[in-house]
Image: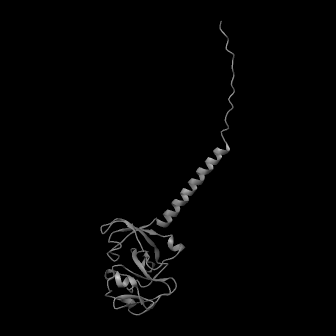
Amino acid sequence: MFRKKKNTFTFHQKKKIITPKFIQEIFSWIMVSVLAVFMAFVIVTAFGMQVKVIGDSMEPTIGNGQGVLVNRLVFKLFGPKEGDVVIFLPNGNTNSHYYVKRVVACPGDKVQIIDGSLYVNGQQTESEKDEYDKMEDAGIAASELKLGSGEYFLLGDNRNSSEDSRSANIGVVTTKMMVGKAWFKLGGQQGSGGFILN
């Protein structure tokens, strides 16, 4: 004997397509996307510039032909400080190439070069005693200079092969002339890449 199978009807409830969990996931993806776009904007704004060093005025820190990534954001937040390697346009001249030099004196400081050594506020700086050659040309710093508000005195690390704040056609450098701080050096003919330590 055959038993008749009972007709069994199953009703499947359709799952709700839009659930609170689904909305939460969509919202999370939107937030991650917005954050990624914002971070990309900040990175491009801060580091979206590269300049190439022309000449040997910053050797051995940065060699001729090396590229440097520029942090343009840091000066807007904190401003330059002594020891920073900065990028600037002399007198704000946009037709000039970018200069890369080191900040050796800041607003309010008194600067003078005596017997080839840098003196800031009457004191010979420690780095002058150990790291740099004596300067053959004191330039405009042969007499004491008092830096005003927003004025900085800049020198190349290779002191006797550098056109910098000692030169009358450059002189003291203002924050308006500065583009940003050298942040990372790229590989080049004279050395490998890496962070610029100040």
Camera-nearest residue between 190 and 150: 190
Residue 14, given in percent of the width and then of the height, sits at: 67, 33
Identity of the residue furthest to the front in this view: 1
Camera-nearest residue between 105 and 168: 105
Residue 51, given in percent of the width and then of the height, sits at: 40, 69
Quadrant of residue 120 within the rendered picture: bottom left
What residue appears at the point 32 percent right and 75 percent down from the top-left corner?
A: 56
Q: Describe residue 168's horizontal placement relative to residue 12 as left or right.
A: left
Quadrant of residue 18 within the rendered picture: top right
What residue appears at the point 67 percent right and 14 percent down from the top-left corner?
A: 5
What residue appears at the point 67 percent right and 45 percent down from the top-left corner?
A: 20
In the rendered image, the vertical position of residue 82 relative to residue 196, given as above or below: below
In the rendered image, the vertical position of residue 20 relative to residue 71, given as above or below: above
Quadrant of residue 165 within the rendered picture: bottom left
Q: Quadrant of the N terminus?
A: top right
Q: Quadrant of the C terminus?
A: bottom left
Q: Describe residue 83's horizontal placement relative to residue 189 as left or right.
A: right
Identity of the residue furthest to the top in this view: 1
Residue 58, given in percent of the width and then of the height, sits at: 35, 76
Identity of the residue furthest to the left in this view: 189
Q: How is the protein colored in the picture?
A: one colour
In the rendered image, the vertical position of residue 163 relative to residue 50, given as above or below: below
Residue 92, given in percent of the width and then of the height, sits at: 45, 78
Number of numbered discs visible in the structure rendering: 0
What residue appears at the point 43 percent right and 76 percent down from the top-left corner?
A: 89
